[in-house]
Structures are given as C-alpha cells and as structure tokens.
Image (spheres, grey):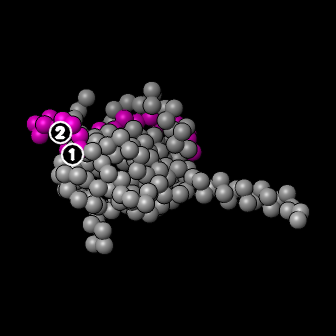
Amino acid sequence: MHVPTFLKYSIMAVLLSLSFALPVQAADPFVLAPAEPQPAASALKPGLAVKYAYGSVEWLDAAETWRGHAKPGKPLEGFVYGDTNGVDNALTSGSNIEVIAFIAGYLHFKEGVHELEFQSNDGLRVTLAGTEVYKHDGKHACESLGAIQIKAPKTGWYALQALYFQKKGTACLDLSMRKPGGEWDWTAPEMYGHVPQ
C-alpha cells in the first residue's frame, strides 16, 4: 500500500514529538541513595543553589552548552515558583526571557515511597541521587508529564541536580508531592537545602 509522502512526514513528526514528551517513570519506584555523608546542619542553607546563563535555546541539550557561561544567582526557595504573568522575571533571575538555570542542592525525604509531580515552563531535567528521574524537553506551557514514584530507604537529604530553561513569556517551576494514593500538596521550602560554594 502506498502511503503519501505528506502522511509519512506527519507520522514521523508525531512520533518524534512523543519521544520528547514521554515520562521517564519506570515500572518500579526510583530507589534513591541518601547523600553520603549527610550534609552538616551547620553547613546547610535554605533553598537551592542556582547559576544563570542567558541565551536563546529550545532544547535541554542546547541549554547544557551554556553551563560554562553561567553565573551564581540568588538561591531558589525550591521548586515553588508558580506560573508568572509574562512580565515578572523567571525564578530569581534577572530576566523574563531566555533564562537557563543550573540548579543544585538537596531534597529532604522521609523514609518510604513518595509520588512527585514536577511542573515546568519550559524545559526541565531533574536528577535525584545521581539518577535522572524526570525530563520534559522543549517549549511548553506550565505543565507536567505526570507523576513519578521514588523510594527513600531512610529519612535524610538526597542530592538534587536540575537543568531548566525558559524561552519567553510565562515561566514556572513547581513540585508537588504525596504518599501514593494520598492528597497532593506543594513542597515546602523547608524540604530544600544547599551548601554554598
């Protein structure tokens, strides 16, 4: 059966877009290893460390190439930034367009299984305890690809690394959490910490 060329390209475009929009959730929870050693309480500061670069990117791989140009910014309170109005700056940056953020610190989890739901506008890649747990690439509105599950073997701090970019217009970076089957709630700033460099 002959498939028209335009239809072939349409199907390929749909498949390609899906490859950038699939949740990375595995069948089982991501089992995380707590930071070793655990950061000393006296060394921890609230929030997450962030470095900013400013440039026009539309994909996370392109954003990563700006790492060498990034400069320290005011720490984030955490992933607690709701959708902006298109005028306010993205996160704690100095701009409301073309923002690239390299984020590092710790998340504090109680022992057990937790469901996490990240929301971003635009691209976001999150690594917890050395494991990539979430990736939502490309430009998009403030949205999530769905919940993931993580398992914290014991209560404590878990290393976090994230790459985020915002192209133009509105911006958001949020994280909500619940016990499986429980009620969703936004993460509290007290869950986030970083050691200043």
Secondary structure under tag 1 reads strand
The residue sitting at 37% across, 48% down in the picture is: 91
Main SS of the magenta part reads loop
Q: Amino acid at mark 2?
A: Gln
| 144 relative to 79, above or below | below
Tags 2 and 1 touching, CB below 8 Å: yes
* Residue pointed to by mark 2: 38
Secondary structure under tag 2 reads loop
Q: Is residue 197 left or right of residue 2?
A: left
Q: Which residues are magenta?
A: 34-58
Q: Is 29 in front, or is 134?
A: 29
The first of marks 2 and 1 along the sequence is 2
Q: CA distance from mark 2 to mark 1?
A: 6 Å
Residue that lies at the very extreme toward the right in this rendered image: 2
Q: Position of residue 59 (x, y in %)?
A: 56, 44
Q: Is 1 in front, or is 89?
A: 1
Q: Is residue 47 magenta?
A: yes
The residue sitting at 37% across, 35% down in the picture is: 51
Q: Quadrant of the C terminus?
A: top left
Q: Amino acid at mark 1?
A: Trp
* Residue pointed to by mark 1: 157
The residue sitting at 39% across, 38% down in the picture is: 102
Q: Is residue 104 magenta?
A: no
The residue sitting at 23% across, 32% down in the picture is: 196
Quadrant in the rendering for residue 112: bottom left
| 129 relative to 16, above or below | above
Q: Position of residue 113 (x, y in %)?
A: 27, 60
Would residue 121 be seen by someone viewing this image from the given angle?
Answer: no
Residue that lies at the very extreme toward the top in this rendered image: 68
